[in-house]
Image (spheres, helix red, strand yellow):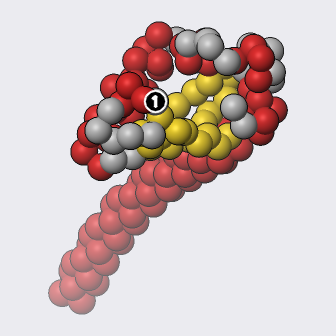
């Protein structure tokens, strides 16, 4: 067990050795997804890489990137070697960017509707103005004929 993993999740090496990896996942669904996806990728590519969530000893949830490679590709029972990276800050930055983009899209939509309304108003004004000009011309022609 790498001491850096222990630092990331708050458990000691002694607390982790011999334990089921399930203890690191906040839900059974997270645990099952990683198992299925990781081993599917290992079967297809020799290595599995997956983003997931881990629950630290203090109960907080972090986002991690896991990469797993079997010790012996012909015998998975011999275990896998995995690396992990805490990607919580990256995931938070991605979420902030997503929210910012959605906010900007809402502003663009609102401004587009506003411009469409102004354009419709200008078209109505233009029709009224053209109609007024025709009416003035008609009146001038009548005045001349009188």
In this picture, is 1 found above or below 10?
below
Percent of width and height locating residue 8: 76, 33
Q: Residue at x 40, y 18 (%)?
A: 32
Q: Residue at x 38, y 25 (%)?
A: 77
Q: Which is nearer the eye, 84 or 102?
A: 84
* Left or right: 124 in relation to 69: left
Q: Which is nearer the eye, 74 or 96?
A: 74
**Quarter-wise, where is residue 9 in the image?**
top right
* Left or right: 108 in relation to 14: left
Percent of width and height locating residue 138: 22, 78
Q: Which residue is drawn at 39% across and 58% down?
A: 116
Residue 125 visible: no
Give the residue number, with chain letter if any, for mark 1.
79
**Label 1: how many residues lie within 10 Å, few (<14), some (14-19) or many (20+)?**
few
Q: Is mark 1 on a helix, strand or loop?
A: loop
> Tag count in the figure?
1
Q: Which is nearer the eye, 54 or 137?
A: 54
């Amino acid at each position: 067990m790498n001491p850096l993993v222990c630092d990331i999740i708050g458990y000691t090496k002694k607390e982790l050795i011999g334990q089921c990896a399930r203890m690191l996942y906040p839900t059974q669904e997270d645990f099952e997804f990683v198992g299925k996806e990781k081993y599917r990728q290992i079967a297809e590519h020799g290595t599995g890489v997956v983003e997931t969530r881990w629950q630290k000893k203090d109960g907080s949830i972090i986002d991690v990137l896991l990469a797993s490679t079997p010790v012996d590709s012909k015998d998975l029972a011999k275990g896998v070697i995995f690396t992990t990276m805490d990607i919580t800050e990256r995931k938070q930055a991605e979420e902030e960017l997503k929210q910012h983009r959605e906010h900007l899209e809402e502003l663009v939509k609102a401004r587009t509707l506003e411009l469409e309304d102004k354009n419709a108003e200008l078209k109505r004004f233009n029709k009224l103005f053209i109609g007024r000009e025709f009416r003035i011309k008609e009146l001038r022609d009548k005045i001349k004929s009188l």
